[in-house]
Image (spheres, grey):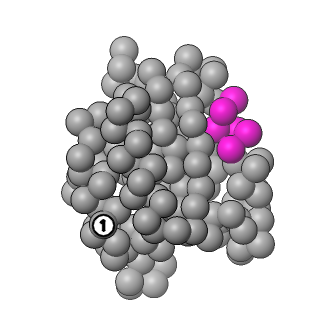
Amino acid sequence: MRVAVLNGVNLDVLERRDPAIYGGLSLNQLETRIYDWARELELQAECRQTNSEGEYVSWCHDALDWADGVVANPGAWSHYSYAIRDALELFEAPVVEVHLSNIAEREEWRRHTVIEDIAAARVIGKGPEGYREALTFLAERQA
């Protein structure tokens, strides 16, 4: 199973963000863990990160042709980007929405996402381990 792991805005500076909220890892460290977890689950992951909304949408379009599942963390775009929502909605493959922080307990504007109703599963507030849970969900769904 091939999985697109699409990380959005500000995740490239993850290690500079509040470690109590975001886990304290760099994006490189997070991606290393994701690749390790994917191998353990016999998945092939491809991680990408961008601060460009248009590039994120293009990556979604590209993944339509090869991904059997998607782990999506668009970052702040989750709360308002209908362009990203529309791009993710095109997938017949399952999309798992991931947020490192517990958005349900943060500022009011973070509590709702525009992709929550199209996600096959949501993992919030579990830090980096949330990606493992998302990959496990996809692996079990494949079985």
Residue 6 percent location from the top left of the image = 50, 50
Q: How many marks?
A: 1
> Can residue 122 be seen in this snapshot?
yes
| Left or right of residue 44, residue 63 in this image | left
Residue 19 percent location from the top left of the image = 73, 68
Q: Name which residue lies at 45% across and 44% down.
A: 71
Foreground pick, 126 / 78: 78
Q: Which residue is mark 1?
A: 83
> Can residue 94 be seen in this snapshot?
no
Foreground pick, 21 / 54: 54
| Left or right of residue 13, residue 65 in this image | left
Q: Is residue 77 above or below residue 118?
A: below
Q: Kindly indicate the quadrant of the structure image that contains residue 58.
A: bottom left
Q: Is residue 44 above or below residue 33?
A: above
Density class for disc 1 (Cα within 10 Å; few <14, some 14-19, many ≥20) is some
Q: Is residue 9 above or below residue 123?
A: below
Q: Name which residue lies at 48% across and 78% down.
A: 106
Residue 69 percent location from the top left of the image = 39, 34
Q: Kindly indicate the quadrant of the structure image that contains residue 85.
A: bottom left
- Quarter in which the N terminus is drawn: top left
- The residues colored magenta run 31-36
Q: Secondary structure at mark 1?
A: helix
Foreground pick, 39 / 6: 6
- Amino acid type, callout 1: Ala
Magenta highlight: main SS: helix
| Residue 84 on the magenta segment | no
- Quarter in which the C terminus is drawn: top left
Residue 4 percent location from the top left of the image = 48, 39
